[in-house]
Amino acid sequence: MNKYEIKTILLSSSVMAVFFFAILYNAFARKIDVPACIPYNATFRQSAIKKVDDTHYEVYIIARMWAFDPAEIIVPAGSTVDFYLTSADVVHGFNIERKGVNLMAIPGAVNKTTVNFTDYGTYRIVCHEYCGAGHHNMMAQVLVTYLKK
């Protein structure tokens, strides 16, 4: 092997080690959750908000030209929400501001993530993938209300 091949192999190995370290650091030290892609279930054809218990909700969201369904989700502060996301037509983005949620809504696939809403307020949901002429109007929101005692 000549010296340039050895340098290339060492440089490539170093870059792979840095990427591997970054993945482990984000997964364990920063506790960043990787969204799950679950098998498509044909029964998920309608949007829904299901209350599992007082602080746990399941939200089934369908992205379509140019809206999220449901467009408004209301939960009390301190809630944990499981979002199940799919698309009815084209690829859409799904971003919840101030929560670090960034999913893709893909026809024929269901993506899932879990979000804890500890602070009350309004969290906008926007589409971050260009999906056509009405893309800039594609928004929804999560309204987090005071916890009633």
Image (cartoon, rainbow, N blue to C red):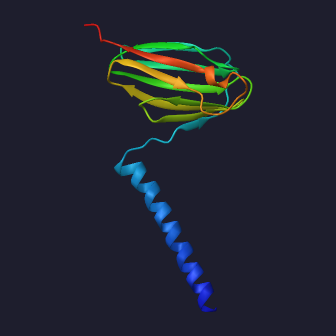
Q: How many marks?
A: 0
Q: Indicate the quadrant where residue 78 lies.
A: top left
Q: Is residue 12 left or right of residue 149?
A: right
Q: Residue furthest top?
A: 149
Q: Position of residue 13 (x, y in %)?
A: 53, 73
Question: Residue 24: x, y in percent?
Answer: 43, 56
Which residue is depicted at the point 41% across and 50% down? 26
Quadrant of the image for the C terminus? top left
- Please give left or right for residue 71 compared with residue 75 in the image: right
Quadrant location of residue 37?
top right
Q: Looking at the image, which residue is at 73% across and 29% down?
A: 90
18, above or below 132, in the image: below
Q: Is residue 121 above or below residue 27?
A: above
Whether 32 is drawn above or below 111: the answer is below
Question: What is the quadrant of the N terminus in the image?
Answer: bottom right
Q: Residue furthest bottom?
A: 2
**Which residue occupies the foreground of this view, 17 or 121?**
121
User: On the rendered structure, is 128 left or right of 147?
Assistant: right
Q: Residue at x 53, y 67 (%)?
A: 16
